[in-house]
Image (tube, grey):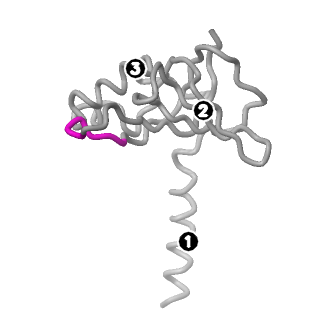
């Protein structure tokens, strides 16, 4: 019985793991927003913004605030006009470089970290499997 479950569950798990990992660059964006606007939408109504954006492909345009590196490779960037309202982007494939200034990143929105009721202003929208779609 255990072997039968193994042969049923493992292929199913592998198939499900493969779903959703297509190339972000080939996917059409459901929404295009600025980094400032998407954070504000989550702060205004986190539930509605979550239903609108989470697990959707979105294009976010904003100024590069910070580039995150690990082992000499770019692993992500932060888009923001200030230090409190941030879109944190991680990449599907490591880009060779990130231009300074404003860029557009297409990725999958995975959530929001922030609390509009907190004494700390702002919050962070998480964008995963990102690709740079337009350098401005």
Q: Which residue is mark 1?
A: 10
| Real-space Cα separation, disc 2 to disc 3, in angstroms | 15 Å
**Which one is earlier in the sequence, the residue at label 1 or at label 2?**
1
Decide: few, some or many residues near mark 1? Use Cα within 10 Å; few <14, some 14-19, many ≥20.
few
Q: Quadrant of the C terminus?
A: top right
Foreground pick, 3 / 126: 126
Image coordinates for residue 88, horizontal then vertical, percent: 51, 35
The answer to whether 35 appears left or right of 135 in the picture is: left
| Main secondary structure found in the magenta portion | loop
The answer to whether 96 appears left or right of 130 in the picture is: right
Q: Which residue is mark 3?
A: 36
In the image, farthest residue toward the bottom = 1
Tell whether position 116 is magenta: yes
Decide: few, some or many residues near mark 2? Use Cα within 10 Å; few <14, some 14-19, many ≥20.
many
Give the extent of the magenta segment: 113-118
| SS category of the residue bearing label 2 | strand
Image coordinates for residue 38, horizontal then vertical, percent: 37, 24
In the image, which disc is placed on residue 40? none
In the image, which disc is placed on residue 77? 2
| Real-space Cα separation, disc 1 to disc 3, in angstroms | 42 Å
Residue 11, picture quadrant: bottom right
Cβ–Cβ under 8 Å for marks 1 and 3: no
Question: How many numbered marks does the figure carry?
Answer: 3
Foreground pick, 25 / 115: 115
Going 27% across and 30% down the picture, which residue do you hit?
Answer: 43
């Amino acid at each position: 019985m255990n072997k039968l479950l193994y042969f049923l569950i493992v292929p199913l798990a592998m198939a499900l793991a493969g779903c959703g990992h297509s190339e972000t660059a080939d996917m059409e964006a459901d929404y295009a927003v600025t980094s400032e606007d998407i954070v504000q939408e989550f702060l205004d109504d986190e539930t509605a913004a979550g239903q609108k954006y989470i697990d959707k492909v979105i294009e976010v345009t904003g100024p590069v605030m910070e580039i995150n590196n690990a082992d000499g490779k770019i692993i992500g960037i932060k888009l923001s006009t200030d230090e409190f309202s941030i879109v944190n982007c991680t990449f599907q494939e490591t880009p060779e470089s990130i231009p300074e200034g404003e860029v557009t990143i297409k990725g999958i929105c995975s959530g929001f970290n922030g609390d509009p009721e907190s004494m700390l202003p702002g919050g962070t929208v998480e964008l995963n499997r990102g690709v740079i779609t337009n350098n401005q």
